Image (cartoon, helix red, strand yellow):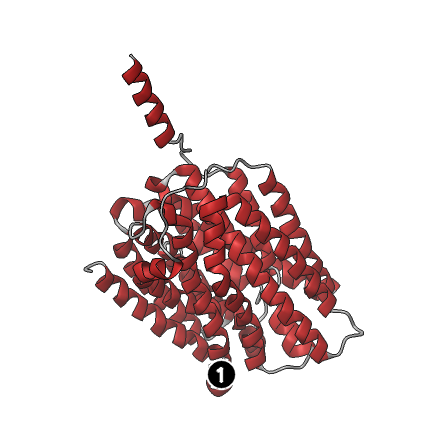
Amino acid sequence: MSALAESTKALTETAPDYRSRPAPGIIAALFCGYLAIGLPLPVMPLFIHERLGFSNFVVGLVIGIQFLATVLTRGYAGRVSDRRGGKRSALQGAISCVVAGLLYLISAMPALSPSVSLAVIIVGRLTAGFGESQFVTGCVSWSIASVGPQRAGMSMSWTGIAMFAALAIGAPIGMWAYQIYGVEAAMIACIVAPLAAGAIASRELAYSTPSAATRLPFYKVVGQIWREGLGLMLQGVGLSGLTAFASLYFTARGWANAGLVMTSFGVGFIFVRLVLGNLPDRIGGYKVAAWSLALEALGQAMVWMASNQVIALAGALVTGLGCALIFPALGVEALKRVPASNRGSAMGAFVAFLDIAYGISGPVAGVISTQFGYAAVYLFGTFCALAGAALSLTASRS
């Protein structure tokens, strides 16, 4: 009986009682926190270009610089998640995002010169990048901890739904606030959203106990998952083009409803995540990623060749359909390459490749748009998505 009792105790300690779905509080907190990323997306380019008078290259640089801060701090965010739990990382990130919103608000003060306003925005973007790094890495690893590794793909589908629902809703709200009430209203919303996220997150169970197992150094984690990360990076080029230049593209063509670009993207994205979110867990990530990247390439080509805003919005929708499962598909494969004690670091490293895509794509797209026009940005996205599809096919054989 004693041996049976000890065996039962050991089983209880090593087999946590996982949820069948990610914890609602984590998903709700991630949605609210990511609103702070979506709200300024259509506003920042217009504010920097039209009100402050800076070039397209500067627009792309400022949009992309947030992701430089994010990628440089993903290792730290992963360590916090592995050692102290995803909840701790998420709460720290929410606080940083509140500070970023305050800096955005300060940058809109009429008394500041354009150069000073730009400098404050850059500091705000760097702070937001630091906050997003911790917040997203924390929430993603926290959500996986709530359901267990066997449902990692489904968990990442739900966290992605929360993030892109926030983009889809946040972008038009930010544009509406900017057009009706001015840039200050949009920036105040960037303060309120992460405050709400922190309040929700603070009430949720931690769901994970930091592991004492041996962990790989962050650079070794990167070495294990670089193929999956590079595929994710190539996917991110198309999304970066939509977030950074769609509002300017629509304005240049004389089209209305630029704020609906991310809404269209989000509708396609969320539809696929809801209907097919468990597909990577069922049939394997590489196959899903290859087909998804090919579909993203089609959507980007539609935006590139659009003769009116309906086709452009349809292209954004198809891009969303394609992008929907790339993160969970390649993320599932990335998690298979590292020990359980490195899951937080693996997620941090994996998402860092997406940060690199955003950080590089903004300035590159700025140069492309200046030389060849805004439509060429989406031709660039088409080629990158096709390269990602080819990489996913080769990675599946390695």
Please, is residue 338 above or below residue 222 in the view? Answer: above
* Residue 103 horizontal side relative to residue 216, left or right: right
Using the rendered view, name the quadrant where residue 126 is placed.
bottom right
Q: Nearer the viewer, residue 356 or 110?
A: 356
Please, is residue 126 above or below residue 112 in the view? Answer: above
Q: Nearer the viewer, residue 3 or 277?
A: 3
Name the residue at the top extreme: 1
Q: Nearer the viewer, residue 244 or 1?
A: 1
Please, is residue 273 above or below residue 254 in the view? Answer: above
**Which quadrant holds the C terminus?**
bottom left
Residue 152 in the image: x percent, y percent? 37, 44
Residue 13 in the image: x percent, y percent? 38, 29
Residue 144 in the image: x percent, y percent? 42, 43
Residue at horizontal 42%, vertical 50%? 344
What element does badge 1 sit on? Answer: helix
Residue at horizontal 32%, vertical 48%? 339
Amino acid beneath label 1: Val
Please, is residue 71 above or below residue 201 in the view? Answer: below
- Residue 314 seen anywhere in this rendered image of the structure: no
Residue 154 in the image: x percent, y percent? 38, 44
* Residue 305 horizontal side relative to residue 294, left or right: right
**Which quadrant holds the N terminus?**
top left
Name the residue at the left extreme: 397
* Residue 333 horizontal side relative to residue 197, left or right: left
- Which residue has dot 1 on it? 367
- Residue 251 seen anywhere in this rendered image of the structure: yes
Using the rendered view, name the quadrant where residue 350 is placed.
bottom left
